Image: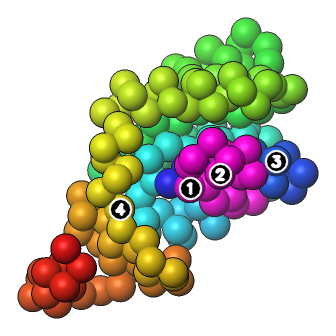
């Protein structure tokens, strides 16, 4: 799953559509508050993060991501209109793994995402560890069951029984 934090709905819809066509799962958020609420339930493989956002800006959000144990290793690509050398250096020095300025080419963005996921150790084999059927997904790597985009709180016995039934 890739999370996009972008307040421009035209850009976020285009990026989500492109990523889905490229074989990724993607979800967009308009602000850091929405992102952090979702991070409580699900950790993505990568985050695309704008700088100029309502409320907290992307640099503050990035710093919070890097300071939190559960999220500090998530690859983050800044995707922003702020393209000066100062802005790029600030973003990278605050913990961004890559920095892409708007306007950008969608094919290049997908290539950068694939490259960063390879370096992070996410492989196509890892993606195959998710079994989806309708609105339910079982992620065998993280031992999570998701129904209608919400993580189900299962006991270990319930999870093992479910895995036995589907394998």
Residue 93 visible to an observer of this rendering: yes
Left or right of 142 on screen, residue 25: right
**Where residue 87 appears, x then y in whole percent?**
71, 20
Contact (CB < 8 A) between labels 3 and 4?
no
> Which of the two labelled residues, at mark 4 and mark 2, occupies the earlier sequence position?
2
Please give the name of the residue rendered at 54% of the width and 70% of the height, measured from the top-left corner: 37
Residue 83 included in the magenta stretch of the image: no
Contact (CB < 8 A) between labels 2 and 1?
yes
Mark 3: give few (<14), some (14-19) or many (20+) Cα within 10 Å.
few
**Where residue 36 appears, x then y in whole percent?**
53, 63
In this rendering, the answer to whether 122 lies above or below 152 is above
Please give the name of the residue rendered at 43% of the width and 65% of the height, measured from the top-left corner: 42
Left or right of 49 on screen, residue 97: left
Please give the name of the residue rendered at 81% of the width and 54% of the height, measured from the top-left corner: 13
Mark 4: give few (<14), some (14-19) or many (20+) Cα within 10 Å.
some
Identify residue for label 1. 25
Identify residue for label 3. 14
Q: Which residue lies furthest to the front in this view?
A: 167
Q: How far apart are marks 4 and 1 (CA)?
A: 12 Å
Q: Residue furthest right?
A: 10
Residue 13 - label = none
Viewer-nearest of discs 3 and 4: 4
> Which of the two labelled residues, at mark 3 and mark 2, occupies the earlier sequence position?
3
Identify residue for label 2. 20
Mark 2: give few (<14), some (14-19) or many (20+) Cα within 10 Å.
some
Please give the name of the residue rendered at 51% of the width and 82% of the height, measured from the top-left corner: 135
């Amino acid at each position: 799953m890739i999370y996009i934090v972008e307040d421009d709905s035209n850009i976020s819809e285009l990026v989500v559509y492109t990523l889905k066509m490229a074989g990724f799962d993607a979800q967009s958020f308009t602000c850091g508050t929405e992102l952090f609420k979702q991070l409580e339930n699900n950790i993505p493989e990568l985050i695309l993060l704008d700088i100029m956002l309502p409320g907290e800006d992307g640099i503050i959000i990035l710093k919070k991501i890097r300071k939190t144990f559960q999220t500090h290793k998530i690859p983050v690509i800044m995707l922003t209109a702020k393209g000066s050398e100062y802005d790029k250096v600030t973003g990278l020095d605050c913990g961004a793994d890559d920095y892409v300025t708007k306007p950008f080419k969608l094919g290049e963005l997908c290539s950068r995402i694939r490259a960063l996921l390879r370096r992070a150790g996410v492989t196509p084999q890892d993606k195959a560890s998710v079994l989806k059927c309708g609105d339910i997904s079982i992620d065998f790597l993280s031992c999570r069951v998701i129904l209608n985009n919400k993580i189900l709180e299962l006991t270990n016995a319930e999870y093992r029984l479910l895995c036995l039934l589907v394998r």
